[in-house]
Image: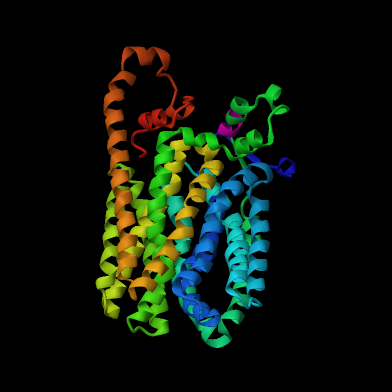
Amino acid sequence: MANNIAVHCYSEAPDGGWGWFVVLGSFLSHAFIIGSYKSFGVFFPYLQEAFGQDAAATAWVSSIMGAVLLFGSLPVGALCNVFGCRAVVMTGSLLATTGLLSSMFVTSLPVMYLTAGFITGLGFSFMYTPCITMVGRYFKRRLALANGIAMSGSGAGSFALAPVFQLLIDNYGWRGSLFIVAGVALQGCVIGALLRPIQLKADIHEKKATHIPSREANDGLIARLCGALDLSLFKMPYFTIFNIIMMFLSIGFSITFIHLVKYARTVGLEPQQAAFLSSVVGISDCVARLGYGWFSNLGLYPLLRGFVVCSVCCGLSLVFLPFAQTYPSMVVCCLFIGVFVGCLNTKITVFLVEFCGVERLASAVGIAFGVRGFSILFGPPLAGYLYDVTGNYNVSFYFAGGTVLCSSLMTSALEAHRTRNVQRQKPDMLGSEKSNEIPQSNVTADEIDFGDSKDLLIIRETSV
């Protein structure tokens, strides 16, 4: 299917042009998909009341939705390589609409796991991953800025959708609200139309390097599946370690988004006030992504080092949240949480491009977001269980902040290892031996073929 579509071929990412419409599509995708997931905690108290279940059981609805959203990124990366990002996004829009409409008629919580959790989450995944991939393919020099603008949609969506969801529930009930949300999900077909295919010189080189005709006919199903998913990315140490870091970060993020509204209501806040806390996280997230995307492009510091600082501050904000017992103090905590969550999320695609290369970005994004699904699947139910046992959310948010702080320790070790390698090997690369192997005339780091992402990072040391 994808082979029949006319594509524009470029020697390198154009850094503009139609790429800004791709950024717009990605912004709208983030605004609805991630905004809906982060704001779905508004439905939490009503689902718990409607089905008469405890917090741990009810949390599985949002947990399954978020987990499938990320788990689905693994096969979605392969589907994008076969069918193209545009077709995958439109298919996801139809799936998400079907799941939300079906949820209106559900009378038991296990069925809600299937409709609102699995089907809707799968549709969201089909819409989400391709939009991230396309921004990475259209931009190179201004990728941090473009990615910051695109991903700021999640903050804008969280800011707008949380109070809107509460207003819809107040007027139409939670079932009627899902009907309206399903109508919005159908607009993903328009978003998909903005993702014009593009072919880069790196794609041609990658196909030549991986195309082995004599073995294709003899490959088994498992081998072909692994080839489509590009699981060889796990041979890159930096990529593997970064995925573990993101799993720890995702535990803290998911607990906050799902349980924040319920926590606020347990300390005495009104429903609209509690919902507005999600909006505070959303708007600060949005502003942070825009500002940090621009600021990080200035090259004033290594990006991994900035990632460490943001993760430490985010973890401390989550730990301090249970101490905020008044509405103003909770607003302040949520403001800091949103800022640092936004800064952290802005850099994910940038690191993946550096670790894996733009020609393998679709698979890298799919795998990276897929493995994070484990965190979102088990994190929120565990936080709900801790609430059921202790009777308050203090331990739940201590746990969330602790996992984020653990991720900062791992990122510090990664950054220190990378810096040491750069300092040790840079003199060798400037020596006479390397000068003979890599002529200095008109050869750039992007034109050198590296088999290991570590070498790529050493060459392009100013990027990360």
Quadrant of the drawing holding the N terminus: top right
Please say if 230 is above or below 60. Answer: above
Residue drawn at the location 49% of the way across and 70% of the way down: 57
Residue 291 image position (x, y, % from top left): 36, 57
Q: Answer whether residue 440 is visible to the viewer in this image.
A: yes
Please say if 441 is above or below 40. Answer: above
User: How are the colours assigned in the image?
Assistant: rainbow
Residue 226 image position (x, y, % from top left): 60, 37
Question: How many numbered discs, if any?
Answer: 0
Of the pair 385 and 361, the residue shown nearer to us: 385
Q: Residue furthest front?
A: 389
Q: Main secondary structure of the magenta part?
A: helix
Q: The magenta stretch spans which residues?
A: 201-205
Residue 121 image position (x, y, % from top left): 58, 61
Residue drawn at the location 33% of the way across and 59% of the way down: 340
Residue drawn at the location 58% of the way across and 67% of the way down: 113
Is residue 444 on the magenta stretch? no
Of the pair 423 and 230, the residue shown nearer to us: 230
Q: Residue furthest bottom?
A: 171
Determine which quarter of the picture holds residue 397.
bottom left
Residue 288 image position (x, y, % from top left): 36, 60
Q: Answer whether residue 28 is visible to the viewer in this image.
A: no
Determine which quarter of the picture holds residue 362.
top right
| Left or right: 333, with 158 as reference point | left
Residue drawn at the location 63% of the way across and 42% of the way down: 81
Please say if 206 is above or below 139. Answer: above
Quadrant of the drawing holding the C terminus: top left
